[in-house]
Image: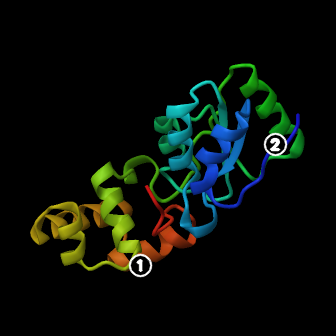
């Protein structure tokens, strides 16, 4: 394997990929300037569908694996894998196989699993937004947001959305302020 480029900001990835035409890209989710490697991967796949892309992260964010699949990423690994396992994933991805981990256990597993709207509400709460701001951003009424927050709290066993938000950010289940 030969490294043809290394960049720190995922927003530059498409330009570099178009110039270098690599067979494979290994990209982090969280890069400099709050850029998102998954968003960059989707853009690269639109232009270079034959390029194999492996996303890696050290953050167990509950939506990253699903987002990567939707973006057309070929494989996904967590940074805690050993070098031998990483090389094995890289080789198998180049050979046309896909590798995706089972989502990590979190407070949002099983009966506490949140739907897409609930995740959006929690993500905005993690960003410190008020119910009014969340309602405006999601084009919902404040009453609907209040009801949905109650449902989130009921599912997760928390009594306060901000306590849940702090826990979600602390355990890495939600990465606030990330480009989507």
Query: What residue is shown with label 1?
Result: 163
Residue at position x 35%, y 65% in the image: 122
Residue at position x 50%, y 49% in the image: 39
In the picture, measured across the screen, residue 155 lies left or right of residue 172, that is: left
How packed is label 1: few (under 14 Cα within 10 Å), some, or many (20 or more)?
A: few
Describe the colour scheme in one phrase.
rainbow
In the picture, measured across the screen, residue 157 lies left or right of residue 10, that is: left
Q: Is residue 4 placed above or below 138 in the rendered structure?
A: above
Kindly indicate the quadrant of the structure image that contains residue 128: bottom left
- Taking the image as drawn, is residue 76 in sight? no
Query: What residue is shown with label 2?
Result: 4
Q: Which mark is residue 176?
A: none
Name the quarter where the C terminus is drawn: bottom left
x%, y% of residue 117? 28, 54
Real-space Cα distance between discs 1 and 2? 45 Å
x%, y% of residue 91? 81, 27
Question: Under tag 2, what secondary structure?
Answer: loop
- Taking the image as drawn, is residue 12 in sight? yes
Q: Which is more N-terminal, label 2 or label 1?
A: 2
Q: So how many labels did they put on this image?
A: 2
């Amino acid at each position: 394997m030969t490294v043809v480029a290394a960049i720190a900001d995922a927003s530059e990835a498409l330009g570099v990929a178009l110039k270098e035409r690599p067979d494979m890209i290994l990209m982090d989710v969280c890069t400099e300037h709050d850029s998102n490697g998954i968003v960059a991967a989707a853009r690269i796949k639109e232009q270079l569908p034959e390029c194999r892309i492996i996303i890696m992260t050290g953050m167990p964010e509950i939506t990253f694996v699903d987002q990567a699949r939707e973006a057309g990423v070929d494989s996904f690994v967590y940074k805690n894998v050993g070098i031998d396992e990483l090389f094995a994933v890289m080789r198998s991805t180049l050979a046309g196989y896909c590798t995706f981990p089972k989502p990590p256990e979190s407070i949002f597993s099983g009966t506490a699993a949140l739907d897409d709207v609930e995740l959006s509400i929690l993500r905005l709460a993690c960003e410190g937004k008020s119910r009014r701001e969340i309602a405006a951003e999601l084009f919902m009424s404040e009453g609907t947001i209040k009801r949905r927050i109650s449902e989130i709290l009921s599912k997760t066993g928390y009594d306060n959305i901000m306590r849940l938000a702090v826990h979600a950010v602390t355990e890495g289940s939600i990465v606030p302020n990330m480009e989507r």
